[in-house]
Image (spheres, rainbow, N blue to C red):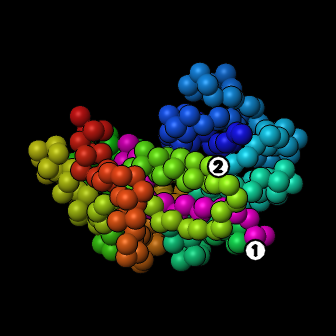
Amino acid sequence: MTILVTGATGNVGRNVVEQLENRGADVRALVRAPSKASFPAGVEVVKGDLLDVDALRSAFSGVSTLFLLNGVVADEYTQALIALNIAREAKIERIVYLSVIHSDVYVNVPHFAGKFGVERMIEQMGLNATILRPAYFMDNEITIKDVVTGYGIYPMPIGDKGLAMIDARDVGEIAAIELMRREQSATPLPLNRINLVGPDTLTGADAAAIWSDVLGRTIAFPGNDTAGFEQNLRQFMPSWMAFDMRLMAERFLSDGMLPDAGDIDRLTTLLGRPLRSYRDYVAQIAG
């Protein structure tokens, strides 16, 4: 039987494919441009996107388990609902969906609200799924590395409530473990949710202090200017997306991204090892 991975060329998707391949799964990767995709030899690559119903029907044919990942795009919600309806039509009863932590709290943030709507569909339609809810990805720090090293500031307005940042490699491995658990079960397993968090909950000042330690010089945290953050983002992304990111940052300030009791222990047990730390991640990308 085959596990289909959507969003397979992205940060998380690539890790999911690799982890599944390591576990001996039959993997099919749905990609927009197969010529640009680079996967292990055993991975079947199919062309299509999540708004192309005919391509989805073809890609979902013969699939037993689905990993559904939607990028942050204007029609993310529609993509996810179409994909789940096609999965139901194809009688796929084993699903892992990548949502986001506090999707039910960050109600005004478009890409969070959309994911919460997808979670509601999964629940209301009685689909057998694991809903993974990751916190902020450490991997976002790659986009600010040059600012940190060049200007001596940590520019992300992440506030002082704290974010339980997680490494995308841990997300991919946990997703693969859940996909295999569902794939190998004699009967479809009931709905469950897992918060995906890192081992430390970090404020803006904490993040700047870790960068300072790793680089051996002072990195300042100038504060939480969400308006300036939006303006900076508009230089390289559409205005709607920059505004979406600003709204998210404002919820960082008011709510944080805090783990629930037992989340870290649960993930450590699931992985059979400690979660990757922010300090190690920063040392890796700064090196």
> Is 186 left or right of 178, judged from the image as shown?
right
Amino acid type indicated by mark 1: Gln
Position of residue 87 measured from the top left corner of the image (x, y, whole percent): 79, 53
State the quadrant of the C terminus.
top left
- Circle count: 2
Q: Quote the CA–CA distance across marks 2 and 1.
A: 22 Å
> Residue 34 at x, y = what percent?
69, 26
> What residue do we see at 45% from left, 61% from top?
196
Residue identifier under label 2: 183
Residue 203's mark? none
Q: Would residue 1 appear left or right of 279 to someone viewing this image?
A: right
**Residue at the (66%, 67%) spot, across then down:** 190
Does residue 164 sit above or below 234 in this rendering?
Answer: below
Q: Residues within 10 Å of mark 2 (few under 14, many from 20)?
A: many
Q: Is residue 103 visible?
A: yes
Question: Does residue 245 lie above or below 257 as drawn?
Answer: above
Q: Residue 175: image x %, image y %?
A: 53, 51
Residue numbers of the magenta segment: 125-142
Question: What residue do we see at 64% from left, 68% from top?
Answer: 191
- 11 magenta-colored: no
Q: Which residue is mark 1?
A: 124
Labels 2 and 1: the sequence-earlier one: 1
Q: Residue at x 48, y 60 (%)?
A: 134
The residue positioned farthest toward the front in the image shown: 186
Between disc 2 and disc 1, the foreground one is: 2
Label 1 secondary element: helix
- Residue 262 or 111: which is nearer the viewer? 262
Disc 1 packing (10 Å; few <14; some 14–19; many ≥20): few
| Viewer-side residue, 127 vs 287 | 127
